[in-house]
């Protein structure tokens, strides 16, 4: 039996839905205010098409988040210094954390919606595992730093979307100040060999 090919318009519909969701989320007060019906209408597709392609609202948010994150991931996996794999770990770790923070600042509502989706929170997200693995691998290259796996979790906690939203949104901490605080915290942790007291 020949392999079933996806409909020709499936890729076009998916791209239209992601573009529509991106536009609506960017214009809206919050991700929560945007409904699946809003996205379907903006994309010019039926709600059934939307649910068939993404399953549910969380699936749509995950797909859009992954599409926005892809260029950052490519820079980390294959790019030049300071994010790329050839960068010495002491320079790469702060650069990785800064990239995560900047991404979440630029995508605050989307990151917050994704991290709050489901019972597992941010730790069940595929992107979290990827960031943790990448950060842990870099930390393992730093001599004298104990328990790279836990340290990676602790550093990633400083970039959680709810914390970023609290600091940048509610407390209105300027972007550069937030980045500077994270860089200073990371430097202290690395210089102290993980012993912050």
Image: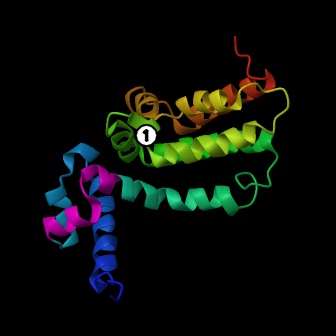
Q: Which residue lies furthest to the right in this view?
A: 143
Residue 29 visible, this angle: no
The quadrant the C terminus occupies is: top right
Colour mapping: rainbow
Number of marks present in the image shown? 1
**Where does residue 61 sit, x and y in percent of width and height?**
33, 53
Magenta stretch, main secondary structure, is helix
- The magenta stretch is 46-61
Q: Which residue is drawn at 43% across and 37% down?
A: 122
Q: Which residue lies furthest to the bottom in this view?
A: 2
Q: What element carries label 1?
A: helix
The quadrant the N terminus occupies is: bottom left
Residue 131 vertical placement versus 179 (above, below): below
For this view, does 43 lie left or right of residue 139? left
Q: Which residue is drawn at 81% across and 39% down?
A: 141
Reading the image, the residue beneath label 1 is: 124
Q: In which quarter of the image is residue 46?
A: bottom left
Mark 1 burial class by Cα count in 10 Å: few <14, some 14-19, many 20+: few
For this view, does 176 lie left or right of residue 13? right
Q: Which residue is drawn at 81% across and 35% down?
A: 142
Residue 136 vertical placement versus 130 (above, below): above
**Where does residue 11 sit, x and y in percent of width and height?**
34, 77
For this view, does 149 lie left or right of residue 7? right
Q: Nearer the viewer, residue 184 or 193?
A: 193
Q: Quadrant of residue 55?
A: bottom left
For this view, does 40 lie left or right of residue 23? left
Residue 65 visible, this angle: yes
Q: Does the magenta stretch include residue 172?
A: no
Q: Nearer the viewer, residue 181 or 187?
A: 187
Q: Which residue is drawn at 28% across and 46% down?
A: 31
**Where does residue 158 sit, x and y in percent of width and height?**
55, 29
Q: Is residue 51 magenta?
A: yes
């Amino acid at each position: 039996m020949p392999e079933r090919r996806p409909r020709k318009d499936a890729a076009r519909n998916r791209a239209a839905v992601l573009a529509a969701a991106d536009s609506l989320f960017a214009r809206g007060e919050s991700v929560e205010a945007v409904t699946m019906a809003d996205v379907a209408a903006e994309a010019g597709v039926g709600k059934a098409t939307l649910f068939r392609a993404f399953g549910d609202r969380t699936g749509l948010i995950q797909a859009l988040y992954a599409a926005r994150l892809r260029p950052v991931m490519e820079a980390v996996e294959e790019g030049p210094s300071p994010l790329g794999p050839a960068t010495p770990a002491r320079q790469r770790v702060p650069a990785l954390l800064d990239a995560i923070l900047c991404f979440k600042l630029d995508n605050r509502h989307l990151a917050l919606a994704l991290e709050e989706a489901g019972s597992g929170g941010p730790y069940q997200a595929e992107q979290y595992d990827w960031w943790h693995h990448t950060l842990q691998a870099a930390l393992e290259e730093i001599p004298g730093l104990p328990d790279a796996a836990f340290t990676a979790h602790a550093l990633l906690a400083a970039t959680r979307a709810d914390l970023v939203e609290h600091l940048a949104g509610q407390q209105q901490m300027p972007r550069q100040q937030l980045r500077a605080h994270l860089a200073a915290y990371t430097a202290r942790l690395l210089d102290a060999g993980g012993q912050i007291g």
